[in-house]
Image: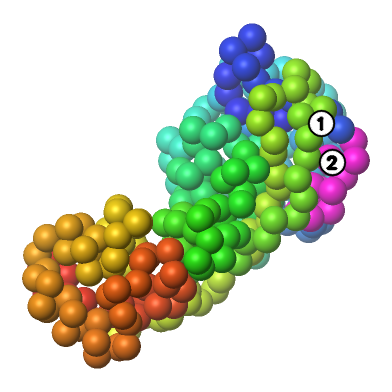
Amino acid sequence: MGRGTAPPLGQHFLHDRAVIKRIIDALEPQGWTVLEIGPGRGALTYLLAELAERLVAVELDRGLAAGLQTDPQLSEATVHHGDILERPLSEWVAPLPERGFLVVGNLPYQITSPVLFACLEARAILERAVLMMQREVAERLVANPGSKTYGVITVLTALYASPKLLFTLGRGAFKPPPRVESAVVRIGMRRTPLGGVDTPGGPSSTWVAAVVKAAFTQRRKMLRNSLVAGLSHLSTGELRERADEVGIDLRRRAETLSPEEFVTLARVLPGPVDV
């Protein structure tokens, strides 16, 4: 299980049967269309092919993809050789099932954030994702306000999904063992974003993301400083006036605001072009 790079370049294959079972159990693939990211040597793929209504797997490594494509045990599955990020996730599983689909995969560090955001973008038809990633990233996903690991990815994920860190696993679960520890996260998609994002009268997801990113650009500074620096069209006076309307103290730091408070702030702050 892994994405795309050839084994000599550092790919790590999951082989622990107990871990494999826990991932399958967390995904609950029975009766669903499943999109597997980076099947590698098929640690999950063969079980998924038996349990899922339909399985689509995307592998970047040409040799690994070819091996799965020609395996008679996977004759009912669809295995693509390609980069999972080259198109929206929904396009990989087209034609779209009416019920929606699930995602499972082991994510290398460099594509973890892009895949997470791709999952959030597909939330209207993606029911849930079970993803293995570096423990450090997993802990950031589920961090609480006020903690050092709480940041942009925490807030934006929480607005559209409900992540849960299921378990961590040691290096011995892989061959060869990686240098870092991993964790498995289950992410259930929200049908309605927190705070009324992208609803009539609510702020757009683009503007909320801009406010969140500006606030965390200088996370050690007070909000009034980081937001003025990150949202250059706003004056300190205007920022203070709008924040006072909703009771948000700009002397606070970004890491102390809940996701809902970020939405509240974005709702009253005018964008670069106030429409």
Q: In this rendering, would 246 be left or right of 125? A: left
Q: Is residue 154 left or right of residue 185?
A: left
Is-magenta flag for residue 20?
Answer: yes
Q: Which residue is mark 2?
A: 19
Along the line of sight, which residue is nearer the eye, 185 or 47? Answer: 185
Q: Secondary structure at mark 1?
A: helix
| Residue 52 horizontal/vertical position (percent) | 78, 49
In the picture, which quadrant includes the N terminus? top right
| Amino acid type, residue under disc 1 in the picture | Ala
Q: Is residue 233 visible?
A: yes
- Nearest to the observer: residue 25 or residue 70: 25
For disc 1, the marked residue is 173
Q: Position of residue 190 (x, y in %)?
A: 56, 71
Q: Residue furthest right?
A: 18
Q: Residue at x 50, y 36 (%)?
A: 111
State yes or no: discs 1 and 2 in contact (Cβ < 8 Å): yes
Magenta extent:
17-27
Compared across the picture, whether 48 is left or right of 33 comes to right
Q: Quadrant of residue 21?
A: top right
Local crowd size for mark 1, using a 10 Å CA cut-off: few (<14), some (14–19), many (≥20): many
Estimate the x, y position of residue 39 in percent, counting from the top left.
Answer: 69, 31
Does the segment drawn in magenta span residue 225?
A: no
Q: Quadrant of residue 30?
A: bottom right
Residue drawn at point x = 75 percent, y = 22 percent: 177
